[in-house]
Amino acid sequence: MSFYDEKRIYDDFDFKAFEDKVDSKQIENILSLDEISELDFLALLTKKAVPFLENIAQKARNISINHFGKSIVLFAPLYVSNFCINNCAYCGFSTRNNIERKVLSFDEVEDNAKIVSSLGIRHILLLTGESPVKTSLEYLTECVKILRKYFEAADIEIYPLSVDGYKKLGEAGASGLTIFQETYDEPLYKTLHTKGAKTDYKFRLETLERGGQAGYRNLNLGALLGLGDFVSEVFFMGLHARYLQKKFPSSEIGMSFPRIRAAEGGYKAQTIISDLMLVQAICACRIFINRIGITVSTRENNKLRNNLIPLGVTRMSAASNTQVGGYAKKNNTKGQFEISDAATLQEIKDMIYQRGYQPVLKDWLKL
C-alpha cells in the first residue's frame, strides 16, 4: 500500500461542505490541543481560520523554536540541464517551448560548483529537466561525484527513478531527494501533463517512497500552488508528509510551498495564492506535523521571505540562479522560472541575523 492508496480515501470528500460546518469555537479548540487530527489540520486551512491567523502563527513559531531552535539552513540550486521530454503547461522547460537547450559538460559542472562553493555555501541541490537520454543516470552519477568534492551535502531534484537508480546516486554521494507532485488533483494533473513520462500520476506520487526505500535521509515534497484548489492541495501535502514520516522514521521529511511564477510559455495561475494564504499553509502544516522541514525558495521576494522566517521556515535557497550553469555566466539559457529574491548571500545572512536567527551554511544534520 502506498500513499496513492491512502489518498484515495478522500476521492469523494466534499471539501466545501466540510468548510461550511467549521466554526470559530472549533478553531479555538484546535489551537488549544498539543496534537491535532487530519481533519483539525483541514479546518486550519479553511477561510474560517483566517481571523485566527495571528494565533495560528504564534503557535507555529513556538513549535518551530522548540524543535529546530532559531536557525535557517541555506542552500543553492544548480541546474545542469533544461532538456525535457514532458509537456507541462506551466513549466519554462516544457518540450513545447522553443528555448535554447543545454546540458553542462562535467568541466562546466565543476566550474559552477567552484563558484557556489566559494560563496561559503555547503549544501547544493542538483536540478535538471526531465530527459533520461540527455541526462542519463550515468551522467547524473558523475555530476553528484563532482559536487561532493565541493559540498558536504548534495540533494537531487531530477526525473523519477527506480529504487536501484536512487541507490546508485546515493552511493555516489546524494543524500536528499526533492520532487514535487505539482498537483494532487489527479484529473487536473492529467490535463496539465499531456506528454512524456510525467503523465504517469501514480508513478510520480510514489517517487519519494522509492527514495525512502533507497535510504535517502532527506525527502522533500511539495505542490505548485496556483494550479489547483488551495485547501485540498495543502491538505494532501500535509497527509503525504505525515505518511512519509511514519513509513520512513529515519528520514527527515521536508515540505516546500512554491507559488507559480512567470515562465516561458506564459501559463497563468488558475488560483491566486495570496501572501496571507501562503502564511496560513506554512503555519497549519507546522502545527499538524511539528517536526517537518519547511523550505521557502527565491520564488518569493526578499521582504516576504524576511517575514516568513519566524513562522516555521527551516531552509531557504540563497543567491539562486535557475539558468543552466548560470553561476558561471557563460552561454546562459532561460531560467525555469523568474526569481523574485535577487539578494546576495551576505544580504540574506544579514536579514536572518536581523530576525534573531542563525544562518547555517553546513548540512545541519552533521552539526
Image (cartoon, rainbow, N blue to C red):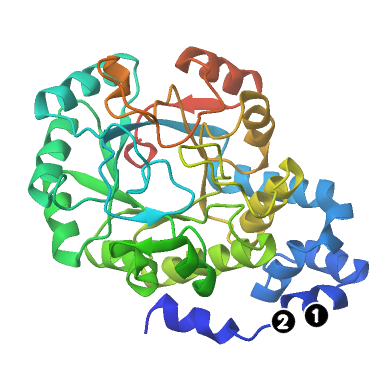
Pointer 1 local density, CA inside 10 Å: few below 14, some 14–19, many at least 20? few
Q: Is residue 168 left or right of residue 367?
A: left
Numbered tag placed on residue 17 in the rendering:
1
Report the residue at 48% width, 61% height from top.
192
Q: Are marks 2 and 1 in contact (CB under 8 Å)?
A: yes
Report the residue at 36% width, 67% height from top.
199
**Viewer-proximal residue, 65 or 244?**
244
- The picture quadrant where one finds residue 251 is bottom left
Query: According to the image, label 2 marks what residue?
Result: 14
- The picture quadrant where one finds residue 331 is top left
Q: Position of residue 102 (x, y in %)?
A: 22, 32
SS state under label 1: helix
**Viewer-proximal residue, 188 or 67?**
188
SS state under label 2: loop
Report the Cα–Cα distance between label 2 and label 1. 5 Å
Q: Is residue 8 left or right of residue 281?
A: left
What amino acid is labelled 2 in the image? Asp
Work out whether residue 164 can be spotted: yes
Q: Position of residue 158 (x, y in %)?
A: 28, 49
What amino acid is labelled 1 in the image? Ala
- The picture quadrant where one finds residue 253 is bottom left
Q: Quadrant of the N terminus?
A: bottom left
**Is 191 drawn above or below residue 333 in the view shown?**
below
Q: Position of residue 66 (x, y in %)?
A: 61, 46
**Is 354 drawn above or below residue 52 in the view shown?**
above
Q: Position of residue 354 (x, y in %)?
A: 64, 18
Q: Is residue 358 left or right of residue 283?
A: left
